[in-house]
Amino acid sequence: MGVKKPTMEQLKRIAEKFDLDLTTNELSLYQELIEGTLESYNRLNQLVEPSLPVKYPRTPGYRPSAEENPYNAWYWKTSIKGNSTGKLTGKTIVLKDNISLAGVPMMNGSAILEGFVPDEDATIVTRILDAGGEIVGKAVCEDLCLSGGSHTSATGPVLNPHDPTRSSGGSSSGCAALVAAGEVDMAIGGDQGGSIRIPSSWSGVYGLKPTYGLVPYTGIFPIEQTIDHTGPIARTVEDVALLLEVIAGEDGLDPRQSGLEVKPYTKSLVGHAKDMKIGIVTEGFGWDGLSEEDVDHLVREAAYSLENSGATVEEVSIPMHRDGIHIWNGIGIEGLTSLMVKGNGMGTNWKGHYSTKLLDAYGKARKIRANEFSDTVKMTILLGQYMQDQYNGKYYAIAQNLARTLKQAYDHALKTYDVLIMPTTPMKATKIPSSDASKEEIITRALEMIYNTAPFNVTGHPAMNVPCGKSEGLPVGMMIVGRHGEDDMVLRVAHAFQSTHERVAANA
């Protein structure tokens, strides 16, 4: 089908949108001139664009019944096996449902995309299968991944395996719940404001947001290019490190990547933190109206326990950490409105692989089903476009400039300390809002837990949730943050903590 020539009325509306005063004769002239350029678009329709490879056979699988899905954490079940040997042989992996898996439905938590089936495999999918892993399905995620709670998905709330009345955390809600419940060995989550670390914290598993650009985002539905991350979730540090080894590295198709060195991450797991210096960031504790005393206590206790593993542990103040949430808001809200909404998930002005089928399906659906967005998405669209209309992107620009200052503040502390520690989330898992909850409660429960996690999406530092205890039957998470490219050091400290507590448990 050829590209249609614009009508005079369509051109008139566009002119008005851009404050152009054009006469009818001028519009008619432009219409004639445009017709010639449309030949290029019609030629593009005849050319074959390159696509991401699909190397391994699969069947579509099925949507599991409620009996098979007690935590409502599965979106789709399947079984796709790769090589018979490799680092991931014998491991089962579930993907967050914003990751393209050819032939298997992808909803990204949103009614807008229901029924869409990708025709390509994300880069990390091929790497997992090449390494011998078995991909066993797609995990429920929050509506367009825009919630730190687990109550916004169009398929209903994901329940926390530790207490089904509580949130499993979001937006990689199903990933963390399935790992915590022992239904899969590993998961791949996504993280733009904490969406790997938050559900890992509330569900009691390990989850790493790698250094920005270490793992290719190719073939994954984005939110905002400068804060997009994807990474591993598992029940042990060993499995997190193993999965990172497989998925890390350049693919030549993702503009987020910048040639970071890939390391043998499993070899960094030496069981101790000897000669390492650890800084406890005081500003990560005591958030007014958010922090719970038991969470702050358990995280501090866990951090100081690393002295038993050979580390030096001290308190450090980074005042600008408290401004990280404001900088993230300035980038995230306008950025996602521009890329994820108006740009149909792909936008323009970057080189790399565009998932054409996905952006076309989402773009068409968005125009006729916008009322089905979650309340969180609707509020963000309204605010993001208001800021663009009224202030011309000025505050997005200010926030991106301040992002460098924030990074420098952490980097200054990381000259003294090998890693930094604070609570992953200020509070334990919250109650899932009732079906008749107010919009205020729904939105509050979706965004209140990101204050410690979101700053590191802005700065790109590697950051990992480490389960460090329970209070009132609910998990508490400690976040370990490292220097750019030193994911291995973050994993080393996490493993030192895990090993120390395994020894204590064995001797109890």
Image: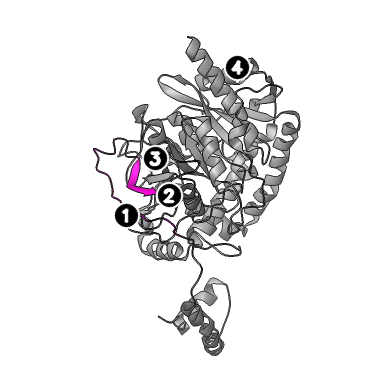
Q: Is residue 141 something one can see in this rendering?
A: no
**How many C-alpha atoms fall within 10 Å of the one at disc 4: few (<14), some, or many (≥20)?**
some
Which mark, by number, is residue 82?
2
Which mark, by number, is residue 174?
3
- At label 2, the amino acid type is Gly
Outermost residue toward the front? 85
Which segment is the magenta one? 54-82
Location of residue 118 with respect to 488 vertically, above or below: below
Work out how far the residue at label 4 is from the one at label 3, CA to CA, in angstroms: 31 Å
**How many C-alpha atoms fall within 10 Å of the one at disc 1: few (<14), some, or many (≥20)?**
some
Camera-nearest residue between 399 and 53: 53
Earlier sequence position, callout 4 versus callout 1? 1
Work out how far the residue at label 2 is from the one at label 3, CA to CA, in angstroms: 23 Å
Image quarter hosting the N terminus: bottom left
Work out how far the residue at label 1 is from the one at label 3, CA to CA, in angstroms: 19 Å
Q: Position of residue 84 (x, y in %)?
A: 43, 46
Location of residue 117 with respect to 185 vertically, above or below: below
Identify the residue position indicated by label 4 in the image: 305
Helix, strand or loop at mark 4: helix
Work out how far the residue at label 2 is from the one at label 4, CA to CA, in angstroms: 41 Å
Camera-nearest residue between 399 and 40: 40
- At label 1, the amino acid type is Pro
Q: Position of residue 231 (x, y in %)?
A: 52, 43
